[in-house]
Amino acid sequence: MDATGNMINMSDGKVGNGTANDTGNLYGGYSASGDATNNTVNITGGQVLASTGSYHYNSGYVYGGRGANATGNKVNMSGGTVSRRLYGGFGENGDATNNEVIISGDASVGYVTGGSSDSGDATNNTVIVNGVDVGGVRAVTP
């Protein structure tokens, strides 16, 4: 089943608790077997925290959309903290196309990627950073 046209608005609070074996991630749209298309995450405050234990590498992430293919997903962040990575779109076994991330204001992010794919193409993805320090930025990650 596809994940299409969903929206998450986060203005306060926490996703994940930053303790051992926590698996907190935030998804605008997620499909384990279908596509993620035209989903949006808006973050104006709050925290997305990574685990301190064995799930550290699988937590503290934000995805505009994640699915077999990820197309037209967006993340707008003007405040808050994402402790690890922020993706506009992530294609698990297909393509990541036309995804967008815009970061401004009082936001704090470890690493930003417009679009990424495990095994497909990542094309026409955009990252816009306005006056914010981030650990690293990539428009696409093949």
Image (tube, rainbow, N blue to C red):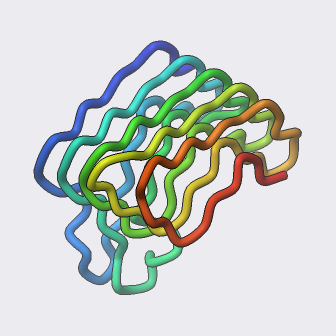
Q: Position of residue 131 (x, y in %)?
A: 42, 54
Q: Position of residue 9 (x, y in %)?
A: 25, 31
Residue at point 46%, 47% (across, down): 130
Residue in the foreground of this view, choosing between 54 and 141? 141
Residue in the foreground of this view, choosing between 4 and 83? 83
Q: Position of residue 63 (x, y in %)?
A: 49, 43
| Residue at the far front in the pictured view | 131
The quadrant holding residue 83 is bottom left
* Residue 43 higher or lower than 28, as above or below: below
Report the side of 137 relative to 14 (left or right): right
Report the side of 107 relative to 136 (left or right): left
Residue in the foreground of this view, choosing between 86 and 27? 86
Residue at point 59%, 33% (across, down): 100
Report the side of 39 relative to 100 (left or right): left
Q: Position of residue 68 (x, y in %)?
A: 71, 33
Residue at point 36%, 60% (across, down): 82
